[in-house]
Amino acid sequence: MAKKKILLTGDRPTGPLHLGHYFGSLLNRVRMQDEYESYIMAADVQALTDNWEHPEKVRQNVLEVITDNLAAGVDPARATLFIQSQVPQIAELTVFFANLVTVNELRRNPTIKSELAQKADLFGAEGESLTYGFLGYPVSQSADILFLRARAVPVGADQLPVIELAREVALKFNKLYGPKVFPVPESVLSPAPRILGLDGNAKMSKSLNNAIYLKDTPEETAEKIRTAKTDSEPAIGYDPEHRPEVSNLVLLYALAKDITPQEALADLGPINNSTFKPLLAQALNEHLAPIRERRRDIEGKPGYIAEVAAAGLKKVLRKAKITMRHVRKAMRIDY
Ligand code: TRP
């Protein structure tokens, strides 16, 4: 049997995961876990780069995002889940990689630039309080990916420039120190379209209070759908450009039923918003039922998440040690 390709991806534990994460990323992980040797990391060190004043929030959400992944169907028998801060080799590799990336490259990185623009409260309107840690998170993310020698990195479009940097780091390291130390990773874009917030905002997000969480109850989900923004046209439709809010709801219906938005419209007929909304709530709740059931199982087993993370850690540490032996030898620091 051919060896499976290694896949790594991560979540910043800054809040519970919502339907945007689920349809954009988690469902994809679940579907890929047989084809790839999969690793899923709670990126707590990275979350601290813009939450260093709120370590308790990061800590609490580490358990939350691991639970969300397992509830969504990531199977710890097939995929390996672990916590970034428990792998010292990632920090070590970050220091070595830091020599291979210029400050200008980081400042020009489109992901860093757009995140900085959104974080003026933390880093100043002109970036005058930008920290070394935040500016350098793409270097640390290169280490996340390369310590496992991952080839496939599923991410959202906003993260593509960070993965590009990881590719450059791998190429540069190999060129300088040894031609085959690291494979060059590739990003895998999720096929799922972008989910808007329930208020029509371009992003479903906790801070905008416009999200349906995987951990919401059926009643909470139905209530959020009931009050979601629509328009005053007589019938629902799918026209993301001109009718973004109702199109987003039709898209959610289609994703819940695993059909296209066009098929959803054909099935539903020219109904109005108030007839459609309960049907959408029902479709979502049916789709989420097995996820909620797995969550109940997990919550009924105290200590289970800790066990999964401990088993995952054991496995990745074995791999990390092997990688670091190669790295130290290549860098002539294998004293
Ligand atoms: N930066 C990613 C995000 O914000 C999270 C992440 C951390 C990640 N390390 C990673 C993703 C390694 C892919 C690979 O979503």
Image (cartoon, rainbow, N blue to C red):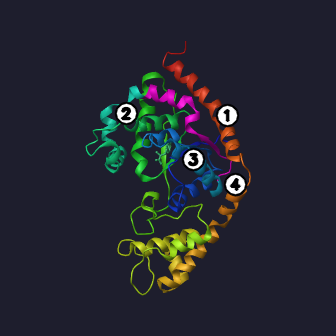
Quadrant containing the C terminus is top right
Amino acid carrying label 2: it is: Tyr
SS of the residue at dot 3? helix
Mark 1 or mark 4: whose residue is earlier in sequence: 4
Q: Secondary structure at mark 1?
A: helix
What is the span of residues highlighted in magenta in the rendered image?
74-97
Mark 3 and mark 2 residues within 8 Å of each other at the beta carbon: no
Q: What residue is shown with label 4?
A: 299
Between label 4 and label 2, give the one nearer the viewer: 4
State how far apart marks 3 and 4 are (Cα). Answer: 15 Å
The correct choice, above or below, for 45 with respect to 178 in the image is below
**Residue that badge 3 annotates:** 60
Residue 134 lies in quadrant: top left
Work out which residue is located at the far top of the displayed protein and give it.
335
From the viewer's perspective, is the residue at label 3 or at label 2 nearer? 3
Q: State the image coordinates of residue 27 (x, y, percent, origin top left).
A: 58, 58
Q: Which mark is residue 314?
A: 1
In depth, the one of 268 and 200 nearer the eye is 200
Give coordinates of residue 168: x percent, y percent: 41, 35
What residue does disc 2 label? 132
**Mark 1 vs 2: CB contact within 8 A:** no
